[in-house]
Amino acid sequence: MMWARMTSLRTWRRRAADESGAALMELSAMLPVVLLIGVGVIELSNLFFNYQLVQNGVRDAARYGASLPFAKDSTELAIQNGWIRNIAVTGQPTGGTSRLQGWTTAQVTITRGTVANPLLTGGLRSYRADGDVQVLTVSARVPYPSLGFLGFLGASSALTLTASQQERVLGSR
């Protein structure tokens, strides 16, 4: 009886000192955490990349629109607005492939207005022009095309990429 108990005790001590399988247990505990962080980094990088695409498109469109000649009538203004929207979405005035999946010209807003240009002390103005200055504002609101990770968390439908750029209208190239 004593002999069986000693053998059993030795077997348990030997098994307790055996570390085979410890790495597998550590991997199984940490793999979900590492994967979650890795996929989150990829999704966040994609979010920032897509935001940059929208921001660059809106900036390009505002600069392009500010350099167009002044429109003589509403028909010419509508044509110019179409070009501006196409520049924002595709990078080309005539249209083409969208910079971002799901981005259309209908999601681009163009606003024209004026900014006060008062005479400052010393006789100078903020802008080197007399009177008010015409400005063009191009804005876009685009739903974020998630890679799927945010959808897994239930947050993909709530994200909208929003960008806006305002430029002083020069009126000619």
Image (tube, rainbow, N blue to C red):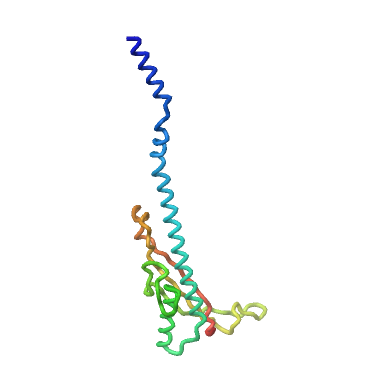
Is 45 above or below relative to 119? above
Q: Which residue lies furthest to the top in this view?
A: 2
Is 82 above or below relative to 153? below
Is 158 above or below relative to 22? below
Instruction: From the viewer's side, name the closer residue of 48 and 157.
Output: 48
Question: Where residue 106 sits: x, y (%)?
Answer: 37, 74
Q: Which residue lies furthest to the left in this view?
A: 1
Residue located at (34% from left, 56% from top): 151
Is 58 above or below relative to 28? below
> In this rendering, would 66 be left or right of 160?
right
Residue located at (42% from left, 52% from top): 40
Residue located at (34% from left, 60% from top): 157
Question: Where residue 135 sits: x, y (%)?
Answer: 50, 78
Q: Quadrant of the C terminus?
A: bottom right
Count of picture labels: 0
Question: Where residue 148 sits: x, y (%)?
Answer: 35, 56
Instruction: From the viewer's side, name the closer residue of 46 and 169.
Output: 46
Q: Quadrant of the N terminus?
A: top left
Q: Which residue lies furthest to the bottom in this view?
A: 72
Instruction: From the viewer's side, name the closer residue of 65 and 42.
Output: 42
Question: Where residue 82 sits: x, y (%)?
Answer: 41, 80
Residue located at (42% from left, 26% from top): 18
What is the quadrant of residue 160 in the picture? bottom left
